[in-house]
Amino acid sequence: MSSGAAWAEAFLEMMAVERAAARNTLTAYSKDLADASGFLAGRGRDLADASAEDVEAYFSSLAARGLSAATAARRRAAVRQFYRFVLGEGWRKDDPSRRVDAPKKGRPLPKVLDRDEVGRIIGAAAARDGAQGLRLACMVELLYASGLRISELVGLPLAALARDPAYLIVKGKGGKERLAPLNAAAREAVKAYLAVRKTFLPKGDAANPWLFPSRGKGGRLTARRFAQMLDEAALAAGVDPAKVSPHVLRHAFATHLLEGGADLRVVQTLLGHADIATTQIYTHVAGDRLREVVETKHPLGRRR
C-alpha cells in the first residue's frame, strides 16, 4: 500500500474485523480521518507522508475551529490509533502523532479489566444454559489465556487443537505462525466445548473445518456475534459492557502479564506483534507495577 487513503481503508477494516467496532464508531472514525486528510491536503501532504509538524498543526487547528473538547479529543484519538496501526504494520518507521500531547478531557481514561472482572465475565459466560455456555466460556478463556486477536479466534480450524493441547498454532497477520499457550483452565474449557461442538454444526455439514462452526452464512461464528455474546456476559457479570470487547480481553492478557513481571519481548512474541513499539502501548496501564519493580529491584532504586 502506498497512499493514506488505502491505509485508512485497511485501518477501518481492522477495526471492524478485529475489534468488532460498531457501525457508528466506524462512521465516526472514517469522518475523523477524512477531516485530517482534508487538512493535510491543504499543506500538500496526506496521511501517508505527514510529518510530526503537520499532525501537530492539525491537532492545533481543532481547537481553533471551535470544536467541542469531546469532538477534538475523538479526532485526535482516531489519528493516534490510525498511526499506531500503521506503525504496527511496518508501513511507516515513525509515529508522527506520538509527540503531540492529548487534550485534557476532564475525566479519567477507562481502565483495563482487572483480574476479578475477567473472572466474573468467564463465570457469567459459563453460567449460560448448556452448549451455548460451554462455547462462550471456551472462547473467552482462549482469548484471555492466549491473547488471540478476535479474527484469529473465530478463524481457528478444528485441526489447530490436538488432544489436550498445551498450545495452539495460530496463523496471524501476514500468514505468520506463532505459538499461543493454553493454561489449564483454557484446556479444560476447550475439552468441555468439544464435547458439544456438534450442536453448532450446520445441517449436513459434519465435515465443517472450523473450531467454532455456525449455521449462519460462512459456516463459522462471526466476530460481531461473539462481541454481542460477550456484552451479554459482561452485563450478567455486573461489568459495564462499554468497557468490554474482544480486544479488551487481549489487552487484559498483555497488561496482566506485564503486571506480573513478564518481559516486554515475551509479550510481544505472544501477541504476534512485528514491532515492539506496538506492544508498548500496553505498558501505560501497567505503569504502577513497572515502577514498583524498578524501585524495588534496581540497585539505585533501593537507595535512600
Image (cartoon, rainbow, N blue to C red):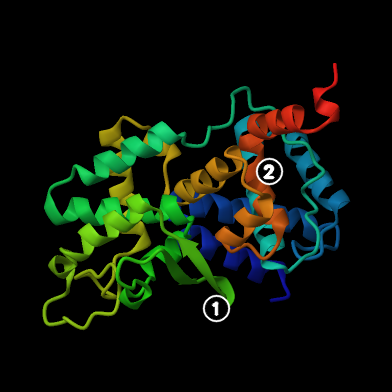
In front of the other: label 2 or label 1? 1
The local crowd at label 2, few if under 14, some if 14 to 19, many if 20 or more residues have their Cα within 10 Å, is: many
In the rendered structure, which amino acid carries the disc numbered 1?
Answer: Gly
Q: Quadrant of the C terminus?
A: top right
- State which quadrant residue 155 falls in: bottom left
Mark 2 lies on a secondary structure that is: helix
Q: Is residue 22 visible?
A: no
Q: CA distance from mark 2 to mark 1?
A: 31 Å
Report the residue at 19% width, 42% height from top.
Answer: 127
The numbered disc on residue 54 is: none
The residue singled out by tag 2 in the image is 76
Report the residue at 80% width, 41% height from top.
Answer: 100
Q: Quadrant of the N terminus?
A: bottom right
Which of the two discs, 2 and 1, labels the residue nearer the N terminus? 2
The residue singled out by tag 1 in the image is 175
Q: Position of residue 272 (x, y in %)?
A: 58, 64
Q: Is residue 122 visible?
A: yes
Q: Residue furthest top?
A: 304
The local crowd at label 1, few if under 14, some if 14 to 19, many if 20 or more residues have their Cα within 10 Å, is: few
Q: Position of residue 232 (x, y in %)?
A: 27, 42
Q: Work out whether residue 235 or residue 275 is closer to the camera in this orientation and state it.
A: 275
Q: Position of residue 162 (x, y in %)?
A: 33, 73
Q: Work out whether residue 54 or residue 245 is closer to the camera in this orientation and state it.
A: 245
Mark 1 lies on a secondary structure that is: helix
Q: Determine contact: label 2, label 1, CB under 8 Å.
A: no
In the rendered structure, which amino acid carries the disc numbered 2?
Answer: Arg
